[in-house]
Image: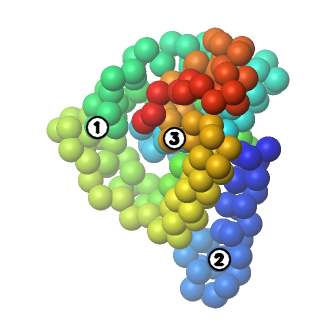
């Protein structure tokens, strides 16, 4: 429910921002992101714990065997890789199936808030990371990132109030843990530090 609420809140604020001025509407209407474009899906995804639980729950409930197998295969490969080294190795997100995000309605705010204005820059960044180890600048919209940061902060504060672990975690690693340990959520709710902070 927390992850669902965050996603709803994010989309609500984006809509309000879009409707607030013709300039904002124009900016959002000219974003480069579209189905099938996934240059950005080769980095570690910073998620909240409720978001990882939401994604793992969707994979289980919808019996997404390909995504589950990909999560299990990818998690050990990225265990000690920072973004730069992961991009250099071009290791895609395991939720990326046939060029599309297989958990799109459940994707975390980090994915929702990366809004590029130029797909060529995204491609150049990934290719440059793979060949030289350093990236290229990407023109993105700032508002979605600001909204996502505020929501991340709110979730972390809510977890702190409830005395449960509320750090940011890496999505694939956390989903892998949740899929292999049925009691992980219960232990987290009891206050155990179940997840590895990003
Ligand atoms: S969760 Fe979806 S949008 Fe996010 S990195 Fe993975 S495939 Fe891409």
**Which residue: 59% across, 46% down?**
160
Please tell me which residue is depicted at 71% across the width and 15% down the height of the picture. 183
Q: Position of residue 31 (x, y in %)?
A: 54, 65
**For the residues carrying marks 2 and 3, which lies nearer the camera in this image?**
3
Of 149 and 133, nearer the camera is 149
Find the distance from the CA under tag 1 to the CA under tag 3.
Answer: 22 Å
CB under 8 Å between callouts 2 and 3? no
Apparent side of residue 82 relative to residue 92 in the rendered image (left or right): left
Instruction: Provide the residue designation for mark 3.
Output: 167
Neighbourhood count class around disc 2 (C-alpha, 10 Å): few under 14, some 14–19, many 20 upward = some
* Picture residue at 66% right of the left edge, 68% below the top: 14
Look at 37% across and 47% down and name the residue there.
Answer: 123
Residue 195 horizontal side relative to residue 61, left or right: left
Q: In the rendered image of this protein, does residue 69 appear above or below residue 103?
A: above
The kind of secondary structure element at disc 1 is helix
User: Circle 1 is placed at which residue position?
Assistant: 84
Which residue is tagged 2?
17
Q: Is residue 14 left or right of 77 when viewed as pictured?
A: right
């Amino acid at each position: 429910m927390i992850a669902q609420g965050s996603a709803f809140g994010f989309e609500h604020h984006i809509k309000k921002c879009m409707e607030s001025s013709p300039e904002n509407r124009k900016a959002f209407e000219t974003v480069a992101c579209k189905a099938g474009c996934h240059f950005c899906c080769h980095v570690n995804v910073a998620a909240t714990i409720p978001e990882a639980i939401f994604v793992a729950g969707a994979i289980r409930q919808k019996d997404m065997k390909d995504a589950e197998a990909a999560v299990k295969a990818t998690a050990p490969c990225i265990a000690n890789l920072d973004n730069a080294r992961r991009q250099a190795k071009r290791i895609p997100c395991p939720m990326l199936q046939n060029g599309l995000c297989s958990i799109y309605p459940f994707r975390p705010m980090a994915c929702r808030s990366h809004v590029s204005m130029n797909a060529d820059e995204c491609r150049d960044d990934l290719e440059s990371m793979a060949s030289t180890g350093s990236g290229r600048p990407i023109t993105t919209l700032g508002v979605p990132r600001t909204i996502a940061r505020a929501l991340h902060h709110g979730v972390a504060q809510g977890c702190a109030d409830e005395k449960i672990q509320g750090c940011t975690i890496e999505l694939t690693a956390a989903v892998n843990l949740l899929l292999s340990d049925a009691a992980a959520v219960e232990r987290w709710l009891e206050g155990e530090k179940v997840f590895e902070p990003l």
